[in-house]
Amino acid sequence: MMLSLEVTSNRFLTSDVVQMELTSEQDLGRGSVGKFIHIDVGRTLRRPISICEVDGHSLTIVYRIEGTGTAWLSERQSGEVLNALGPLGSGYPIMKSGKALLVGGGIGIPPLLQTAKELASNGVQVTTILGFRSEPFLVEEFATYSDVHVVTEDGSHGTKGFVTDVMDAFTYDTFYSCGPRAMLQAVKQRATSPGYLSLEERMGCGVGACLACVCDKADGTYAKVCTDGPVFESEEVVL
């Protein structure tokens, strides 16, 4: 679906992570958890940005400035209208009961916020581990829906180390994770339950046409992260 999104705010959460709030004429609230929008960033290729929060016609994205496209996005002002495709991809299935462990790293953290919100609304007991290099963000927002544990590589906030260093402290029925591939590999190995992984990949088209984002599956075939994912069952893909 083609979207016209009006910027209502655009502010820095850390030195390089930005939160943008948008409104849409379309109601995006149903079934968008874990999905992404493919957003036009001016003179370069569209960028896939995960949906952080969505409530009807309101949409929040959180992105890190990593190049010209996201730098351009960070300069947009309230009232400007952006073009995007979405919501795209396959998102997280939401449990109806039990205990869930959410494990996010870096800019993989934002899509887990809507996940935590919807799990909590179902009565699921949610624990969240948030991993950062040094500067935390969205911690208070996650605390609204879950028991939060912060881990930083430099030890400046929370526990010093990696997200997997604290996973063994919790029991859970299902885990949900998003972050760098090396982190997802470690989370998958450490997890004591089935779960779901959201893969971060470069996407040229976002609709399965260019094959820039393929990943290997455990059955020997391949999947397109943009249309078959970005969320997969943990045993479905080879990392």
Image (cartoon, rainbow, N blue to C red):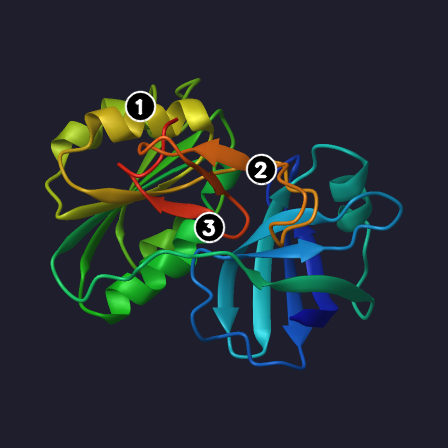
The answer to whether residue 39 is seen in the rendering is yes
Residue on which the image places disc 1: 186
Gap in angstroms between the C-alphas marked 2 and 1: 21 Å
The vertical placement of 117 against 148, above or below, is: below
Quadrant that contains the N terminus: bottom right
First along the sequence among labels 2 and 3: 2
Report the side of 105 relative to 39 (left or right). Answer: left
- The residue nearer to you, when weighing 2 against 79, is 2
Gap in angstroms between the C-alphas marked 1 and 3: 22 Å
The vertical placement of 236 against 1, above or below, is: above
Give the residue type at disc 1: Ala
Closer to the observer: label 1 or label 3? 3
Give the residue type at disc 2: Cys
For the point 23% across and 25% down, the residue is: 189
Label 2: element kind = loop
Q: Position of residue 87 (x, y in %)?
A: 56, 64
For the point 44% across and 57% down, the residue is: 90
Residue on which the image places disc 3: 228
Please say if the residues under marks 1 and 3 sit with CB atoms less than 8 Å apart.
no
First along the sequence among labels 2 and 1: 1
For the point 42% across and 20% down, the residue is: 153
